[in-house]
Amino acid sequence: MGDVILTMKGITKSFPGVRALDGVNFEVRKGEVHALMGENGAGKSTLMKVLTGIYKKDSGTITYEGKEVEFHNTREAQSAGIVIVHQELNMLGHLTVAQNIFIGREFKKGIRIDDKKMNEEAKKLFDRLNINIDPTETMSNLTVGKQQMCEIAKAISHDAKVIIFDEPSAALTEAEIEELFKIIKDLRKQQLGIVYISHRMDEIKVITDRVTVMRDGTYVGTLITKDCTKNDIINMMVGRVIYEDPKEHSMVPEGAPVVLKVEHLNAGKMVQDVSFELHKGEILGFSGLMGAGRTETARAIFGADPKESGDIYINGQKVTINTPEDAVKCGIGYLSEDRKRFGIVVQKTVAENSTMATLEKYTKGLFIDKKAEKDVAQKYVESLATKTPSVDQLVVNLSGGNQQKVVIAKWLVRNCDILIFDEPTRGIDVGAKNEIYKLMNKLAEEGKAIIMISSEMTEILRMSDRIVVMCEGKKTGEIGIEEAAQETIMNMATREIG
Amino acid sequence: MKKKVLATLLSAAMVATLIAGCGSQEAAAPAPEAPAEEAPAEEAPADDAAEAPAEEPAADGAAAGGDYSFEIIVKSYQSSYWQAAVTGVNQKAEELGVKVNCTGPNAESDIADQVNMLNNAINAAPNGIGLAACDQDACLDSLQTALDKGIPVVCFDSGIPDAPDGSVYATVATDNYAAGATAAENLYPALKDKIASATAPVRIGEVNQEATSESITSRGLGFIDKFAELASADGKTVAVIGNEYYVNNCKDKGDEASADVIIEVAVPAQTTVELCATEASVILNKADTIGMFGSNQVAAEGILTANENLDVLGTDPASSILAAGFDAGSVIKGAITSGKMFGAVTQSPLAMGQTTVEILTKIANGETVSDVPTQGYWYDSTNMEDNSIAPNLYD
Amino acid sequence: MGKNKSVISRLGGQKFIVLLVVIGLILFFSAVSPDFRKYTTVMSILDYSYYIALMAIGVTFPLITGGVDLSIGTGLICYSLTGGFLIVQKGWPVWAGILVTLLLSITIGLLNGVLVSVMDLPPFLATLCTCMITRGLGSIFSKGFGISWPTSGAPGSWFRNIFKITVNGTKIPLGFLWVLLLVVLMAFVLNHTKIGRYTIAIGSNKEATILSGINVRFYHIMAYVISGFFAGLAAIAYSAVFSTVQPGTGAGFELEAIGGAIIGGVSASGGFGSIEGSLIGVFVICLLKTGLPYIGLQANWQQIITGLVLISAVMVDIMKRKKETA
């Protein structure tokens, strides 16, 4: 670890009605990876936005390279060498890789943009990072992982001295994370200061040198990573002990009936001849790398995408599912990985979202029975312990974990016996994650059958009774939790590759 | 006494307007002077409508009619045609000393806008309403309201056949069928020899902006029927082909296979100039075409636009196609002057506007009134400058 | 992914398909109607295509930002009426009238841009408002009456020769040359200058573009200014080709231009499109408009067929996209 390059001291920032940051201290040294941790809403992103000039601080000082600074926008921060790699990828899908990297500071020949030079410069950057991406490829054709690499290349191209990674691994597969870590270690060697924001404990242990923990807008403390345990960090974050270890054995009772049977399902390249069974009260984990065809399989079962062939049996009865409507009638609920796009309507209330899939039950004639709607929503707010001031609250105002609970409520109201959870805890902080896990276990105990698609190995190992592994559209393995280990699963998940 | 003066004055104005309609050059101030009253319309020396004497009775009229206010609603501000109508209305209003308020939607197709304007006019409780309705049916409810409130309505330009009894006191409109026939009456003689000497069937094209409004269809049919009548009188057989509406509603559609003269009717998919032009091009391109008729300003200009590239129009039947238009405007007038267009029929919107105000004033005075049909007038390069024609050739 | 591009997408994707449609339409109409093959018909099709083509070039920019400009149709008429009024009624020289026409078009484009970019109005709404405003303004400027710019042969009619000149009795469609030049120029602007690059960027992901430190407001406004300016050029073309400009008309022109652009491959959700594609798309519409009367189809059938062709063009696009994402 080198000298201190960036110091933030006593940073305070208030929004109308909320004190988002209250005297927060933070420091980054050259050649270190410094984790910034805290639950959602703890103020990590706000702090970084104050640093890069998106928000103006109320008080406190920022010292960068020995001088007190205040940036007024991201551009100023960028040119000074402080760059954010955003959590939500800021990609311009229709432009090429090189055009994305140099957006806003194109090389020019007269008024003409010099794309040739941009491609060459991009190539140099990738060489420096040791990654193989064609600069002329259109951005939307890249995998999420590759897109992330481009973001990093972009950051470096700014002559960055401090790079902030905001949940970089959220959308990456294990293999891609490996590659990301390699790059981060490289950057560390080059004496850059790196801020690493993440919820994933495992990663923090692997990649970071120090950890600063925030809670409710305040600074809790800074630890040397190698000297502390996961539980130390978590305790600092939530103020209570919550960590649980992997499931030891299946919780499904012996002889539980098969509620869903899928046979020889085909739907395009991403779903080839997939067969599996799901038992009552079972949590069936779907593991695999990004793009293995898990979501596509779920969507095909749910009728959201067309099937080419294959049979689906519910409780032994063959059923035809061509549309999500058919699926819902069969008692299947699907909780999308992208809540905001598919799961909930954020500008509607908790109550309205809860009855969205069941509205016909809550209408009297032409009118919606608001009272009954609120009653049922209230019931599920209580049973799922959704944190909301009332069922009239707009969903947009809830945290990620509580939004997820509203989606679950929606399908429970619908009386779905088969629930497909697609990345149920993506973007949800540790405390809320735990609650979702408890909830899923409770649902399984009550006899619901659950398919859980997850890219997080610990989540798969912790929650599943049985695990199906997919790779490139094919099912490549199926194991009970008793035999499951990270290595076996990774083997199956990469079986088809190379 | 005052009333009698006014009555005399009005009837004088009436007649003067008719004169103007028939050929007064002094459209700007059709003199409501007493002597004109006795003069038979067709002989009226309109040129003599001296300005000076007109001043006096007009001033008198102003005093008499000053209390009346009328709402005038035109079809649109789409063509210069309505400028002449509005000018006529304003002239007459100033002359009679009545108040008028002219409104109208942006386009003839803005039927709902016009109904709104009509309702607003009714709410303003005027002494009378002059209406050029865009749609024959859309105004019916409003007319009932006007009737209930006792506001008399005078229709001009187009009538409303199904209006509630008693709501429309009079209709001032061009007899479009006759006006269409006027075009045929003037075009046919020029083509007569060519038709007579033709060894193969010849073709007459007709471009109509659309096949729904009463005025356009009447003109189109008037032309077809009169042309067929004239040709038959010379022993030629006639067939009508093209747009279904016109084929089915003309007097005799004939048989295309055996006809000497084929009248081909084209209607564009939308009422835009370039589609009128395209339809015209299709007919102008045919080798056997000898004559064309465009039944309103847009259609006539469409024919001229098509000719920009084809260059087949002229005034000599031996070497070119003769085109007749309808309405005026600088483009059509220019084409007639330069010999691209053979001639055209014009209405007298100016007279229509004037007559409307007069009739409204009459009604307000408690007199009985009846419908006033106005004519279409043929004009070509020989008579364009005539005093009887020029005032009606609005730009 | 991306590597296994199909032959068609390598040849320019939808543009290529649409070009085939254009060629198919030409062959079909020529086969059915001998008159369609005449040079004069070609002249007419070109004459009547200029104003739509120019509008389509311009409107491609707002479309690519993910917006739309509905004001170009009535705007065209408004600009033309204003310029014509000054020339014909006020006796201004033609060049001055043209200048005012273009300045007014830029002003309305700027207004659209400010409404969309600064005031954050949805483009559909903002330009619908300016559509109505220009419609009314046109009537006011022309005092409600049709205006004819100087007719051919009249003094001041030189501007008509910009689009068509007669050499030794043969008419030359000069306007088509200008349209092609402008296509080349604007294709360069779209693909090789900052304005174009940021237009695509805004359409791809506006937030990300802002975060990249780009003055999104300015470039977003520019897209609408370009659209307005080209509506002004279209107004000149319209005035030069046709005789009388009628107030109250023009609504619907924009749909032909926008329809052409979308047929030509501009993504209805923004981020993707090409100027040359828009031009080819416009010719599908123009060919149908001209060709269908030539094969003797009556009015109602013309509209039905045009609608069907548009639907199939959009369907092809949707199916192609589905295939690509599958």
Image (tube, rainbow, N blue to C red):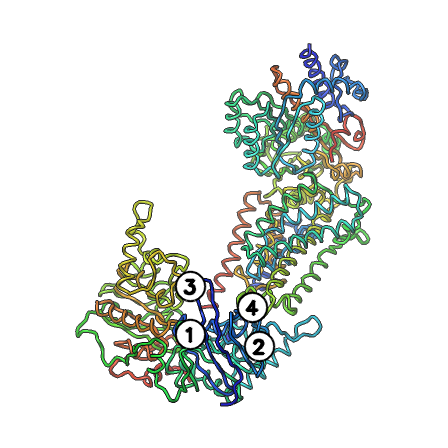
Q: Are marks 3 and 4 on the same chain?
A: no
Q: Which mark is residue A69?
A: 2
Q: Amino acid at mark 2?
A: Val
Measuring 67% from the left and 21% from the top, which residue is drawn there?
B66
**Distance between the alpha carbons at the discs numbered 4 and 1:** 32 Å
Q: Are marks 2 and 4 on the same chain?
A: no
Residue on which the image places disc 3: A341
Q: Is residue A399 above or below residue A360?
A: below
Q: Is residue A354 above or below residue A69?
A: above
The image shows residue B202 at horizontal and vertical percentages of 69, 37
Sequence order check, earlier mark of 1 and 3: 1
Q: Which mark is residue C209?
A: 4
Q: Which mark is residue A345?
A: none
Chain ID of residue with mark 4: C
Sequence order check, earlier mark of 2 and 3: 2
Secondary element at tag 4: helix
